[in-house]
Image (cartoon, rainbow, N blue to C red):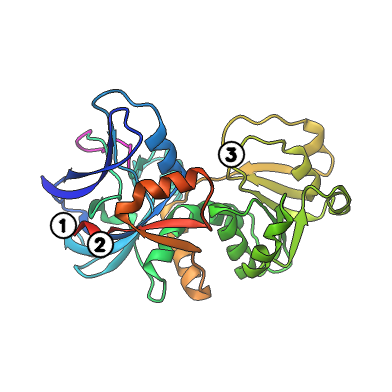
Amino acid sequence: MRTTVGWRADGPATTLRKASLRRRDLRPGDIAVRVDHCGVCHTDLHAVRAPREAGASVVPGHEFTGVVTETGAGVTRFAAGDPVAVGNIVDACGTCAMCRAGQENFCHEFPTLTYGGTDRHDGSATLGAYSREYVVRDRFAYPLPAGLDPAAAAPLLCAGVTVWEPLSALGVGPGTRVAVAGLGGLGHLAVKLAVALGAETTVITRSAGKAGDARRLGAHDVLISSDPDRTAGSRDRFDVVIDTVSAPHDLAPYLRLVAMDGTLSLVGHLGQVTLQAMDLLVGRKKLSSAGSGGRPGTAALLDFCAAHGVTADVEVLPSARVNEALDRLERNDVRYRFVLDLSDLS
């Protein structure tokens, strides 16, 4: 086993403390990565704040960039010194229909998550990238394209690919009318990506105060959802609505905005939803969802972002301020993604 240092919450604690962590020795298909930047996701917040029994611990972090420091004997894709990116999936069965289709995120045996997962070989719990080193199977690491800022690119591996999946699967491009509901970590990247794909892009928000930010991100229009006249005038307007709202909410107002044969894609709130079938029937509308991405889709996203200069809007903090970042994230006090600089763990 090898050791590193990172940020861990033990037992029922809801704050993280610096701790020594153990990583596995490299298997033939593994690489060791010096973690330089790791995004702070709402999933991390939920993991830290969730009740845990005494003895249970969590090390969050599943969207990170860094540099390869060592490779296993069978690795040919990477060499020491290569910049890489890793997302929230670090292994999958590789044999089910979903894995064969390049959708390891939907693995029938469930993918191995970057933290809080179970290693498929030794049964150990995976520990996340709020740490200075991560050991990962090389197939689930991606070359970080030149020109992408490592800090601003880290959230692409979670928030970015989560919205890229529906945009790509639904064929968004020139001539497509896209609306993005919610302007947070997911929403701001959905706007940037939809615009870069050539779509006519609108932001749906309850707050008129976000109109300037929406346009700065590239949105062509802003629809204030609290204005009944504007929303009524936008009925059946959009081919695709990407719903990034994380709290439970009524889907009917968003379905009314979807054009005939269009799609409302839920990527924010993934809990139980209730709707009237008539809201789908009138206009042959579709309801879909997406989460994370497979290996081909993640690689395509990174290449696209490099070609079009798309990265997240981030606030970078030294990792020693991780608990401050989580507290502020809980208050929604971030525009639009915190990223931890792990160099202070050296």
Q: Is residue 235 above or below residue 85?
A: above
Looking at this view, is 254 or 329 the one in front? 329
Q: Quadrant of the N terminus?
A: top left
Residue 87 located left or right of residue 167: left
User: How much space separates mark 2 and mark 1, taking CA atoms?
Assistant: 24 Å
Residue located beneath label 2 in the image: 343
Q: Is residue 225 above or below residue 13?
A: below
Q: Residue at x 78, y 31 (%)?
A: 277
* Amino acid carrying mark 1 in the image: Gly
Q: Is residue 190 above or below residue 322?
A: below
Q: Reading the chain from its start, which is encountered first: label 2 or label 1?
A: 1
Q: Residue at x 30, y 23 (%)?
A: 53
Residue located beneath label 1 in the image: 72
* Amino acid carrying mark 3 in the image: His
Residue located beneath label 3 in the image: 269
User: How much space separates mark 3 and mark 2, taking CA atoms?
Assistant: 33 Å
Q: Quadrant of the C terminus?
A: bottom left
| Residue 29 x, y percent position in the rendering | 21, 53
| Residue 340 x, y percent position in the rendering | 35, 57
Residue 269 shown in magenta: no
Q: Quadrant of residue 280?
A: top right
Which secondary structure class fits the magenta region best?
loop
**Could you say whether the residue bearing mark 3 is in a helix, strand or loop?**
loop
Residue 106 located left or right of residue 169: left
Could one spot residue 241 in this view of the protein?
Answer: yes
